[in-house]
Image: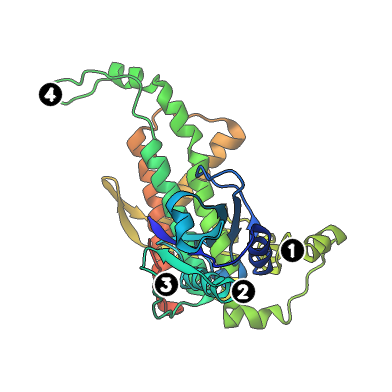
């Protein structure tokens, strides 16, 4: 579902529409829709200050049939984005239509009626709120995806009527091939934790007043290759600073946040939470999961007692840890995470 609007220009060639879009920063892209032969597909995304969520897609296509009767022009401009798009994305969608109509005339038709644009709302977002919302949504979507895709045990054993499971059944269940796969997914759970806290760190040190002050006095030696990456915009200052820390290590992660943001992450995670059927400190649970991942990756230590529920509990620990940090950040930086 999204916003779909079409401008039928009064007078415009495909090349004129092409030049117009490229002048606005649109880049050629591929499209999954089966567009008519001769269609040009474009997309736009604003990476500055995390302004875009969905961006804008624009398609210059040849009209036929009843569409030709609207203005008589052979080419039309279709623009679209999803309902999850940011205020900046929707504004750009409107700006594309307004600018094109001013240049080429014509009629607008779409979701909002004839010659009407997409409604805008009052935007009180900030770079921090947009950046944190984007990374939070992304991680939650990936965790939900792995939960949905997680396979059930391959072996279906008949449980005893009295509910007691003897050693033979436990041993048999441990031979289930699915348990090997559950072990293989443990690094994914840790990578989600690492990814979120690494990305959140880079977002915050770009805008947080404490971090900005420290950047003025920060000294760090850089090799020529890194300087070239910055020049080519292949990396950022924030990414370079983040490289000094390992976010799969709670001590290093905590040091990064304390060094640059005066935030004690371990203290935030030192809270008891119910995970599965047990209540435990988040900090301890995350430490155990990181060590678990270390054993699998570096020692190939397959734990055949790890069940599907056990793995889901790992994901829950990661989710709740991220949730605790988000709640703290919302209060500290006075924003509310946008969930779509």
How far is disc 3 from disc 1 in space, using C-alphas?
39 Å
Q: Is residue 287 visible?
A: yes
Nearest to the eye among marks 4 and 1: give it. Answer: 1
The residue furthest right is 224
How far is disc 2 from disc 3 in space, using C-alphas?
40 Å
Sequence-earlier tag: 4 or 3: 3
Sequence-earlier tag: 3 or 1: 3
Question: What residue is shown with label 2?
Answer: 206
Question: What residue is shown with label 3?
Answer: 115
How far is disc 4 from disc 3 in space, using C-alphas?
71 Å
- Tell me the number on the disc at residue 38: none
92 horizontally vs 121: left or right: right
Q: Residues within 10 Å of mark 3 (few under 14, many from 20)?
A: some
Sequence-earlier tag: 2 or 3: 3
233 horizontally vs 8: left or right: right
The percent coordinates of residue 126 (x first, y second) are 50, 77
Q: Nearer the viewer, residue 220 or 152?
A: 152
Nearest to the eye among marks 3 and 1: give it. Answer: 3
């Amino acid at each position: 579902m999204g916003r779909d609007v079409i401008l039928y220009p009064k007078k415009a060639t495909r090349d004129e529409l092409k030049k117009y879009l490229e002048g606005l920063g649109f880049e050629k892209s591929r499209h999954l829709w089966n567009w008519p032969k001769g269609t040009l597909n474009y997309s736009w995304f604003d990476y500055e200050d995390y302004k875009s969520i969905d961006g804008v897609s624009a398609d210059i296509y040849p009209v036929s049939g009843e569409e030709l009767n609207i203005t008589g022009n052979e080419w039309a401009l279709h623009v679209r984005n999803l309902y999850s798009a940011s205020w900046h994305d929707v504004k750009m969608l409107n700006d594309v239509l307004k600018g094109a109509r001013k240049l080429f005339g014509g009629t607008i038709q779409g979701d909002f009626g004839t010659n009407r644009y997409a409604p805008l709302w009052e935007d009180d977002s900030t770079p921090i709120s947009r950046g944190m919302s984007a990374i939070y949504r992304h991680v939650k979507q990936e965790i939900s995806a792995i939960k949905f895709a997680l396979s059930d045990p391959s072996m279906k054993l008949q449980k005893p009527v009295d509910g007691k499971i003897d050693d033979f059944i436990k041993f048999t269940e441990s031979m289930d091939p699915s348990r090997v796969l559950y072990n293989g997914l443990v690094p994914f759970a840790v990578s989600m934790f690492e990814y979120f806290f690494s990305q959140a760190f880079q977002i915050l040190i770009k805008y947080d007043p404490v971090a900005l002050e420290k950047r003025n006095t920060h000294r760090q030696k850089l090799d020529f290759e890194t300087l070239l990456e910055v020049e080519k915009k292949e990396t950022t200052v924030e990414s370079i600073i983040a490289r000094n820390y390992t976010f799969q290590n709670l001590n290093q992660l905590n040091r990064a946040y304390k060094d640059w943001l005066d935030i004690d992450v371990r203290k935030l995670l030192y809270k008891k939470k119910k995970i599965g059927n047990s209540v435990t400190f988040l900090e301890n649970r995350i430490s155990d999961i990181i060590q678990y991942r270390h054993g699998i990756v570096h020692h190939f230590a397959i734990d055949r007692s790890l069940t599907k529920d056990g793995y889901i509990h790992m994901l829950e620990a990661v989710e709740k840890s991220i949730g605790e940090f988000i709640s703290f950040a919302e209060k500290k930086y006075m924003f509310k995470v946008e969930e779509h």
